[in-house]
Image (tube, coloured by chain):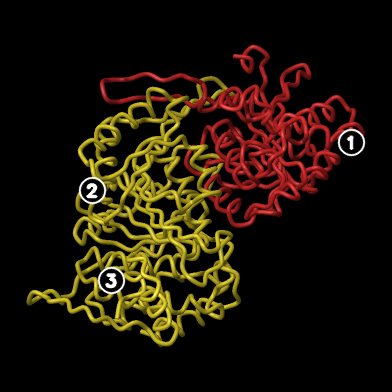
Amino acid sequence: RLSYRAALELGSPPAAAAAVAAVATRALGTDLSYVPIPGDSQMKTVTLIPGDGIGPEVVKCVERVVETLKAPIKFEKFEVSGANPDGTPRESLPDEVIESLRRNKVCIKGTLWAPLYKENTNTQSLNVMLRKKLDLYVNLVHAYNIPGVKTRHEGGRIDIRIVRENTEGEYSGLEHEVVPGVVESLKIITERNSRRIAEYAFEYATMNNRRKVTAVHKANIMKLGDGQFLSVCRETAKRYPNIEFEEMIVDATCMKLVSNPEHFDVMVTPNLYGNIVCNVAAGLAGGAGVVPGVNVGEDIAIFEQGARHVGRDLIGLDLANPTAMLLSTAMMFRHLQIPMFADRLEAAIITLLAKPQNHTPDIGGKASTSSFMTALLEKL
Amino acid sequence: TLRKELSLYANIRPCFSIPGYETKYNDVNLVTIRENTEGEYSGLEHEVVPGVVESLKVITEKASMRVAEYAFFYAKANNRSKVTAVHKANIMKKADGLFLSCCRKVADKYPEIKYEEKIIDNCCMQLVKDPSQFDVLVMPNLYGDIVSDLCAGLVGGLGLTPSLNVGDGGIALAEAVHGTAPDIAGKDLANPTALLLSSVMMLRHIEMGSYADKIESALLATIAEGKFLTGDLGGKATTTDFTNALCSKM
């Protein structure tokens, strides 16, 4: 018996049909046998930052799933918000949070709210600050369509992995008002960060059996900045001759994404274009509620939703979709070298989402967070 | 160069689903208005030290007010009910913050038109999920470039997309968004729709709306009929055939 994903990768229709039938009737068992080294099942401590908006609600779902799966994870929770109680932006995260992250090296995080506050125009978003402080230079977002979740692109198979530079570019936070009414904002592109991100993109492609990397840029306009990014990507591509490399201007990329998304495989982008592209890809795959993501640095990984929206309009309504955060949790299990839990979690989610009665409103259904979770925990 | 010489400060691109040319998105009816002179396209870059490049994004109150004013004027003149300002002011607080405050000032002067703000990433996601929720979009240069091309992709590509560039003193330059297409030049194969729709925009700009309406409805009827479609729309008609069919409808 093949797992559903394995059958699709092989492109084998009879096996895929059999796998789909298996998925429809029960959660997938797996024939795979993972051989632990004594001690592998020891508890691993993971930092947990619920964040703002719907973050606390979906993070609670993560905690319940980890408990039900009996995964060897212990959470160190920090309930911080991006805003002070009076609504002003918070200046920085408490030291204990940073220490915990440096110690545990793995974290699950909801998005922290970055309030737009008129008086204060210097505070960076805490999310951005965290990424810079811990040098989490990669933002990886995996957008793929889940069978049963209706999107505009029926029938097509979307499987896009975006490797986005996470610390510089337009997010440098360096702005000033030259004279009243004239503002300059600096976009910084360094060779070092471009090299690191290009390297990661090709390394990720190699480790995950991907065939193509597309570099997204606007070097026809920003000749020096994006030009530098592009030339570094080209150099790196030469060292991976088995992986196809292409370049695409960001506006043409967006146009192609909405008309022919199957064209894309792995994409490597500077910060802002990556933000736009991964939101477009998330929209194609079903929305912010179903796309997982992670921020990766030299030794720390913070797992979160792929499209980092706070979702303040959904607070307390029990309508948030925990899928994205749960799929990120599955990615975390694999990162922690306990993939068996990822297999079980993903199989259960995919089985559940094949049925419309488990769809929350963001993907066109009427289910609540609670009803989705009840069904999921039962399956697990 | 033309844009700079004539100070064409706003680029207007209406984007609507064309009946008869089906794409995965059939409910699109929006207009993108893009600031055309500054922002990320200022061309001011330098290498600080080897391997470190700074690119300047410039946002001025003057340019932002100009484009915001035009957006609301356009919305009112064309019976549009909502203007959405697209920005990234949570990250670029001063630059996009200035753009937003200009939009808000102008919005106050047009209470009959709904005004909302959307962050560029959420906007792109919403455009891909449900473009029918948008009406007029106003934004700085880079986002405008990306969003207007994204919308063109939603309705069928650059072969059908018109645009109007507006400058100080009421100068207007209407052009199709597509390029010169050297591979089909001189072969009577080109689809004139984009340029015709641009002319329609020009006619409306000089307040000859009735002529504009006539041409537009004849054009849309010709495409909807499907008998004379050029190659890019999947048909076999020549430019001449298509134009004759169009003229016979007026």
Q: Residue at x 73, y 46 (%)?
A: B18
Closer to the camera: disc 3 or disc 2? 2
Relative horizontal placement of residue A372, taking residue B28 as reference (left or right): left
- Density class for disc 3 (Cα within 10 Å; few <14, some 14-19, many ≥20) is some
Q: Is residue A172 visible?
A: no
Q: Which chain is yellow?
A: A
Which chain does tag 2 point to?
A: A
Which chain does tag 1 point to?
A: B
Q: Which chain is red?
A: B
Image: B131 above or below A120: below
Residue at which label 3 appears = A75
Q: Residue at x 33, y 60 (%)?
A: A303
Quarter of the rendering containing residue A241: top left
Which residue type does callout 2 highlight? Glu
- Density class for disc 1 (Cα within 10 Å; few <14, some 14-19, many ≥20) is few
Which chain does tag 3 point to?
A: A
The tag earlier along the polypeptide, 3 or 2, is 3
Q: Is residue A286 visible?
A: yes
Q: Are marks 3 and 2 on the same chain?
A: yes
At mark 2, the secondary structure is helix
Question: CB atoms at circles 1 and 2 under 8 Å apart?
Answer: no
Q: CA distance from mark 1 to mark 2?
A: 60 Å
Which residue type does callout 3 highlight? Phe
Q: Which mark is residue A203?
A: 2
Image: B156 above or below A102: above
Q: Which mark is residue B248?
A: 1
